[in-house]
Amino acid sequence: MNHPPTEKITVGAVDVWALLDMIPPPYTTGDFFPSVPPDAWRPYRREVLDQDGKLQLYYGCFAIRSQGKLILVDTGMGPGPHPDRGNVCGHLTGRMKREGLAPEDVDFVVHTHLHPDHVGWNVTAQGEPTFPKARYLAPREDWEHFNRPEIRGEAPQVDRCVRPLEGLGVLDLVDGESAITGEVMAVPTPGHTPGHQNILINSQGRKGVVVGDLIQSLVQVMEPEWYSRADVDPHVAMASRLAMMKRIEGEGMVMAAGHFPTGAHFGRILRAEGRRYWQVERP
Ligand SMILES: [Zn+2]
């Protein structure tokens, strides 16, 4: 994989890196947003879709350095190759190394949710924690959801990448608002999954948020009422998205979106002529 350039910003005293794990094969719009009629894409074709009219997602994670602690938000799809993603391999730890971040430097791994493209690098092939000194923080409601007998069979990533952490004694289930440092806090944003959470940063009067899959595609900045096939409860997800976008705009937050394109993982939601748009944040 050609390595993309470093994407790093600061939010007050907090450093935030975007770390691309992999680029999966593109999705058709009908597959990813089945409830959106093809014509509704017309205004966004050039801005959001590729030359074949498909939707390219990126699987990105973030590292946050705050008050001497290193926090990794999500762990991508894992090393792979991934037969269900075109046999593409993940590169998270390689990306970290290029930024001078070693697995043993990580104090906390925080999961926005427990879907397969967010937990993949948790444990090694030998069943050891990839981040040997880290506590792993996962939303309790996701843990309970993915352990339900009727869901568990469809979510092998939990048995493969999350359950081993419990046996290793490094898994902490979190509820509600949970402070990670004095500047970084996880807050519930349910709907995409029952326990889905965002990571808020508040430092020296500056604010930021890692949105996880609350916003999965750039098009949702312009069309926040569009929901994807992956949303467990689309209407709850939409309400969470609208509420967080209101905060992002109202509080002037910089937003970090792992599924956005390389070079556009960080940005702000601005308005012109009554329409929202995405302004990429430069370091
Ligand atoms: Zn995702």
Image (spheres, rainbow, N blue to C red):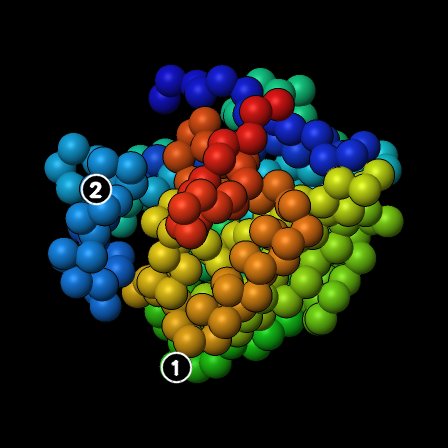
Image: 196 above or below 43: below
Picture disc at residue 45:
2
> In terms of secondary structure, where does tag 1 sit?
helix
Q: Residues within 10 Å of mark 2 (few under 14, many from 20)?
A: some
- What is the quadrant of residue 61 in the picture? top right
Which x, y percent locates residue 52? 13, 37
The residue at 42%/30% (across/down) is 262
Picture disc at residue 216:
none
The residue at 30%/65% (across/down) is 229
Image: 103 above or below 213: above
Look at label 1 and name its amino acid. Answer: Glu
Q: Residues within 10 Å of mark 1 (few under 14, many from 20)?
A: few
Q: Residue furthest bottom?
A: 149
Picture disc at residue 150:
1
- Give the spatial CA distance, label 1 vs label 2: 38 Å
Q: Is residue 121 visible?
A: no
Judge by depth and name the residue closer to the eye, 142 or 233.
233
Mark earlier in primary sequence (1, 2) = 2
Judge by depth and name the residue closer to the eye, 10 or 252.
252
Which x, y percent locates residue 19? 53, 32
Image: 162 above or below 28: below
Q: Is residue 47 left or right of residue 193?
A: left
Which x, y percent locates residue 40? 20, 57
Q: Is residue 98 visible?
A: yes
For the N terminus, the quadrant is: top left
Judge by depth and name the residue closer to the eye, 126 or 73.
73
1 and 2 marks in contact (CB < 8 Å):
no
Q: Residue furthest front?
A: 273
The residue at 54%/57% (across/down) is 245
> In terms of secondary structure, where does tag 2 sit?
helix
